[in-house]
Structures are given as structure tokens and as C-alpha cells.
Amino acid sequence: MFIMMMLLGFIATSSSVYAQSVSVQSAEDIEGSYTGSLTKVYMNGDKSPVSPIVTVVTSNGDGTYNFNIDAFQVGKMPGTITVDAKNIEISSANSAFTATCTNAVKLKILGFIPAKYTAYVTGSIENGKLIYTLTVNAEYSSAPFTAIVTFEGNRASDL
């Protein structure tokens, strides 16, 4: 009898520990402005980190989110880059995400019509911390290039 009580107590304790470790996020937990920096910047070679950078995450109401970064420059480049990655699915029970986002990165050089590129997005968002990497494999003026940036930031405000 004593052994049965001990086993039941152990099972109950194990169950409660497991239940406490599960994290469920709502749209309100995810949506907001995240202030941070581009900690990895690779564009035709490694570049210096860029900060401050703000990623605004908005909910579409269906479990997908949009990530937006206003125009910014890397080093002395003669133009700007804008990020508008749409429909990134983030499960409420799992903070990790991957998506391929069409026209997610816009490159505007010397005032010319901006070029838009598809980006592969992978990352996580949990406890107010957003980390994601954008990878673009494309061409500009018939020259192939790969660009990779990693954003790391903390939630600064609700929307």
C-alpha cells in the first residue's frame, strides 16, 4: 500500500512538472515591436552588425504573422533594404517557425525601382525574445548573390 501511494505521488509530481514546462503563446504574446539588432550580416562577405533595428510583428488573426523592418542601410551601401515578410505561421504551442516569403526583401539602390526578393525565414519567438534569420539567394543586375541577416531583439511594446 505504501509503495502504491509513493508511485501515485511520483506520477502526480511528474505530471505537474511536465504541465508547467509547456508554454502556450497567444497572438497578444507574439504581436508587438521588437527592438534589437542585426547580429549577423552577410552581403557579399561578412559586414558589421546593424543597430538599432525594430521588427514590428503583426497578427493576421489566423496563426500567421507579418514581420516588418523599415528601410535601413548596411555600411556605406548606396541604397536601402526593407523587410516585409508575410504569413509566417507560428504555432501557439511551439515558438519555432520557418517560412518562404515571396517579395519579403526590397532593395532600393540610388533611387531606382526597388527589386523584390523571396526570403527563407527561420527562427523562434518566446518570452518576449525574437530571433530570426532571413536568407536570400537571388540575382541583382544579372549577378547572383546570397544575403543573410539574423535579427535578435526583445519585445519593446504592444501594438
Image (spheres, helix red, strand yellow):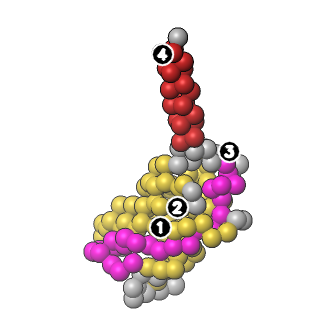
Residue 24 counted in the magenta span:
no
Is 36 within the magenta? yes
- Circle number at residue 130: 2
* Residue 70 sits in quarter: bottom right
Circles 1 and 2 in contact, beta carbons < 8 Å = yes
What distance separates the C-alpha of mark 1 from that of mark 2? 6 Å
- Disc with the residue nearer the chain's start (4 vs 1): 4
Mark 3–mark 4 Cα distance, whole angstroms, equals: 49 Å
Q: CA distance from mark 3 to mark 1?
A: 25 Å
Q: Amino acid at mark 1?
A: Glu
The secondary element bearing badge 4 is classed as: helix
Q: Give whichever of 72, 2 is nearer the camera.
A: 2
How far across and down, in percent of the image, does residue 2 sit? Answer: 51, 15
Q: Is residue 20 left or right of residue 50?
A: right
Quarter holding the C terminus is bottom right
How crowded pointer 3 is (Cα within 10 Å; few <14, some 14-19, many 20+) is rated as: few
Q: Is residue 128 above or below residue 157?
A: above
Q: Which residues are magenta?
A: 26-49
Residue contact between numbered discs 3 and 1, judged by CB atoms under 8 Å: no
Residue that badge 1 annotates = 152
Label 2 sits on what residue type?
A: Leu
Between 102 and 20, the one nearer to me in the picture: 20
Q: Is residue 55 visible?
A: no
Compare marks 3 and 4 and give the one earlier in the sequence. 4
